[in-house]
Image (cartoon, rainbow, N blue to C red):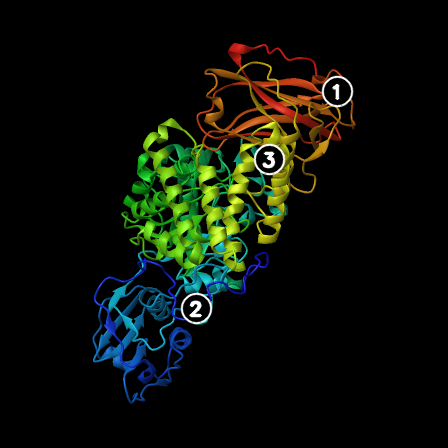
């Protein structure tokens, strides 16, 4: 199965006979002394008398691979038949049993043994036999399946003696998920030995190969309270079954202390599991966002007693788990430790069939380029959950900049170090790496997907060696330039990491010299593979990321304006051709193209005070998840530069957003006055509320929200409206604007938001 939005490459690594996949050391080569096969054509594949489906799959996989690499098709026999010559025993044959038990293997672990010229490929009960064959193909022989964009590479072993290193290996993690769009192919995931957890990939992994332990299809892996909550009729009759927020009960959320809610949720879970009998996991977890846990007196009291909002959640999940275990004892329930629930309760412990899905938001959201042990809160939470006996799956965030997926993000060394840090805690048995799941096309996306998948299988593999393996194997003649590009990015990270600590709260940015150096390397790479269309396209995929970064930097000079506008269209065409349909979570790329165009055409900015921070249309986010009546940028004669944001009403979501970071506030210290320039469209009523402006912090919730009414507007045109006075933020926050419920206006026009240093107030602005 291939994701339909991905344009597939029909050929890439179709090298000349005898060429190598990897120029330089094989990064996956096993340690130990290799033993040589006898004449390949003399071997027979031996299966048990009644083979498991995984063993039959492994036999086909091995036969196809050897035929592709040597031209020899090995015959297959089943016991009790005895091959006339040397054989390759696959799975739990009597022949393998005669060698003794050997090293105990986990469900996905494998063992490769040799005796008297015969080879024994064995494995754990899930995908062990298949993984034994894949390890032989990939680690011993140099086969590669780098990316969904290219075919598998089979090195030429014709006329050569095959060889392998006897060994046994079990991966340290039972769950290994790379949640990146490039990894959303179940066949690619299987061949790269990952175990995707959820839709669309996990349930689709071939069951004949052992499948993947996964959640039921339909998004039952996180943030499930809303869909497990009592229905509308039950809420109307019993609002006490649902969560209390402030002084009101709200639908689509759960009161975690009411005994009837436990019964309702358990029944809903069992209904879903009955329809998906192959599911291994099910999530009962808080809705997304801060302060998501019920605040009724009973739930709040348990939070206070136990010292964490995870207390009512875990207490509730344990009760549901007890009911679910009666009918589905094989299923493990997971719950999130995330935002307010990231710390464990003082005394409540997870039940034996409950997994804690611990997110790294406390570190990675603010510090994606710093090691996980350079800050304290997440470390403490991980140790505390481990110390209370929890089974832990980690939800780790691997993006360098979630608002700019195409920006080069050299944090691979950080991610590898962090993974090894996680595994020092014996309770950690699963890791999910989350990155760009909305579209293919983030910076070094194919490399990142392959590298992270390899590290989840074996965290001890060397990152720099993996990069080199990929560069020369994937890009061929362009490999040297692409590896130099990787080295350049690593140097950028080292420069940043040596200079800044997490306490500095300094966002990563490449140096001024990076972009021209990187562009020169990719130009060199493109020239090296100019005669190879498929490889050229893979170089172009990364070049698009550099073009994105160039556009983010803005017009360099008046003479650059026309080139800049042409580059916008060049990136648009490239992204459409390569299937890159998203630059950030829930943001339509068309907004980016519009923002760049507006920035290039905007008249010179005149700030009202020297250190005012201005948020205009070129930096706004208009999330596409807000329903049908979302905001858009339109031509608007009265606005400062001839454009404004139009928000039709009614809609009550945060439909207009700006991300503000501490780096924005380096111009002046102290407090800032927040104000917005807006006008009203046609009116439905002469009085009443129209919209609100607020500031939200993922750690602290809503810091302010100011509601504006018709009375705040004294004329028909644009007006400045003062919203609040705030301290300079010390972490990334979201400034949001949206219509109020039942807005008195049919539409709102928004020009810009400003934050003016209190010490420079009032501003002096020329007439507009």
Residue at x 59% of width, y 41% of height:
587
Q: In the displayed structure, does residue 472 sit left or right of residue 296? A: left
Percent coordinates x, y for residue 659 in the rendering: 53, 31
Residue labelled with disc 2: 16
Percent coordinates x, y for residue 62 in the rendering: 38, 74
Quadrant in the rendering for residue 54: bottom left
Report helix, strand or loop for mark 1: loop
Q: Is residue 110 above or below residue 79?
A: above
Residue 93: give its label: none
Percent coordinates x, y for residue 337 in the rendering: 41, 42
Tell me, yes or no, if residue 125 can be seen here: no
Q: How many angstroms separate mark 2 from mark 1 (CA)?
A: 70 Å
Residue labelled with disc 3: 621
Quadrant in the rendering for residue 556: top right
Residue at x 41% of width, y 77% of height:
67
Q: Is residue 207 above or below residue 740?
A: below
Q: Earlier in the sequence, mark 2 or mark 1?
A: 2
Percent coordinates x, y for residue 444 in the rendering: 46, 48
Q: How many angstroms separate mark 3 from mark 1 (CA)?
A: 24 Å
Front residue (pair 632, 303): 632
Query: How many labels sit on residues?
Result: 3
Foreground mark, 2 or 3?
Answer: 2
Front residue (pair 351, 473): 473
Q: For the residue carrying disc 3, how many other residues have a C-alpha within 10 Å: few (<14), some (14-19), or many (20+)?
A: many
User: Which quadrant: the C terminus?
Assistant: top right
Front residue (pair 618, 729): 618
Tell me, yes or no, if residue 329 can be seen here: yes
Residue labelled with disc 1: 717
């Amino acid at each position: 199965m291939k994701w339909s939005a991905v344009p597939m490459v029909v050929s890439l690594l179709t090298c000349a006979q005898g060429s190598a996949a990897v120029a330089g050391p094989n990064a996956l080569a096993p340690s130990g002394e290799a033993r040589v096969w006898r004449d390949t054509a003399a071997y027979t594949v031996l299966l048990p008398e009644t083979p498991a489906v995984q063993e039959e799959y492994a036999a086909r996989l091995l036969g196809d691979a050897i035929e592709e690499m040597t031209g020899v098709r090995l015959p297959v026999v089943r016991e009790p038949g005895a091959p006339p010559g040397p054989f390759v025993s696959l799975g739990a044959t009597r022949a393998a049993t005669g060698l003794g038990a050997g090293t105990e293997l986990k469900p996905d672990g494998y063992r490769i043994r040799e005796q008297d010229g015969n080879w024994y490929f064995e494995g754990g009960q899930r995908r062990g036999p298949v993984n034994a064959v894949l390890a032989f193909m990939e680690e011993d022989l140099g086969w590669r399946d780098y990316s969904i964009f290219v075919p598998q590479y089979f090195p030429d072993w014709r006329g050569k003696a095959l060889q392998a290193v006897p060994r046994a290996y079990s991966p340290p993690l039972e769950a290994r998920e790379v949640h990146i769009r490039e990894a959303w192919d179940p066949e690619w995931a299987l061949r790269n030995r990952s175990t995707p957890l959820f839709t669309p990939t996990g349930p689709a992994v071939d069951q004949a190969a052992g499948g993947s332990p996964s959640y039921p299809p339909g998004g039952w892996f996180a943030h499930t309270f809303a869909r497990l909550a009592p229905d509308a009729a039950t809420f109307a009759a019993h609002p006490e079954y649902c969560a209390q927020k402030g002084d009101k009960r709200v639908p689509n959320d759960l009161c975690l202390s009411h005994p009837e809610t436990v019964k309702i949720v358990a029944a809903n879970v069992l209904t879903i599991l009955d329809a998906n009998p192959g599911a291994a996991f099910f999530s009962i977890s808080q809705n997304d966002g801060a302060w998501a846990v019920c605040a009724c007196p009973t739930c709040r009291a348990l939070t206070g007693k136990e010292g964490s909002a995870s207390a009512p959640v875990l207490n509730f999940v344990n009760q549901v788990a007890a009911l679910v275990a009666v009918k589905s004892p094989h299923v493990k329930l997971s719950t999130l430790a995330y935002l307010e629930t990231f710390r464990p309760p003082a005394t409540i412990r997870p039940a034996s069939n409950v997994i804690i899905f611990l997110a790294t938001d406390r570190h990675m959201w603010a510090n994606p380029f710093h090691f996980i042990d350079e800050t304290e809160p997440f470390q403490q939470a991980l140790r505390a959950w481990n110390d209370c006996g929890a089974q832990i799956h980690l939800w780790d965030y691997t993006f360098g900049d979630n608002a700019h997926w195409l920006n080069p993000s050299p944090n691979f060394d950080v991610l590898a170090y962090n993974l090894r840090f996680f595994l020092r805690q014996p309770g950690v048995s699963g890791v999910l790496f989350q990155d760009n799941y909305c579209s293919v096309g983030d910076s070094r996306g194919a490399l990142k997907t392959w590298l992270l998948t390899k590290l989840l299988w074996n965290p001890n593999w060397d990152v720099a060696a993996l990069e080199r393996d990929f560069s020369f194997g994937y890009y061929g003649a362009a490999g040297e330039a692409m590896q130099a590009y990787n080295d350049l990015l690593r140097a950028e990270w080292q420069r940043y990491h040596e200079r800044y600590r997490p306490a500095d709260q300094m966002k990563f940015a490449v140096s001024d010299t990076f972009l021209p150096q990187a562009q020169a390397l990719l130009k060199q790479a493109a020239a090296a593979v100019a005669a190879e269309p498929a490889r050229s396209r893979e170089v172009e995929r990364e070049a698009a990321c550099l073009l994105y970064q160039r556009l983010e930097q803005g017009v360099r000079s008046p003479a650059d304006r026309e080139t800049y506008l042409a580059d916008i269209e060049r990136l648009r065409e490239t992204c459409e051709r390569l299937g890159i349909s998203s630059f950030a979570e829930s943001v339509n790329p068309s907004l980016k193209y519009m923002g760049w165009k507006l920035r290039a055409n905007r008249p010179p900015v005149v700030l009202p005070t020297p250190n005012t921070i201005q948020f205009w249309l070129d930096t706004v986010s208009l999330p596409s998840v807000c329903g049908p009546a979302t905001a858009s940028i339109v031509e608007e004669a009265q606005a400062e530069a001839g454009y404004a944001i139009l928000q039709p009403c009614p809609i009550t979501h945060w439909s207009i957003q700006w991300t503000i970071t501490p780096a924005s506030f380096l111009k002046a210290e102290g407090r800032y006055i927040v104000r917005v320039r807006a006008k009203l469209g046609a009116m439905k009523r002469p009085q009443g509320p129209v919209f609100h402006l607020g500031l939200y912090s993922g750690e602290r919730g809503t810091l302010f929200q100011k509601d504006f009414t018709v009375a705040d507007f004294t004329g028909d045109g644009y007006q400045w409206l003062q919203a609040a006075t705030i301290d300079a933020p010390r972490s990334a926050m979201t400034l949001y604007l949206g219509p109020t419920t039942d807005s008195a206006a049919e539409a709102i026009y928004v020009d810009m938001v400003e934050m003016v240093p209190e010490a420079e107030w009032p501003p002096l602005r020329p007439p507009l």
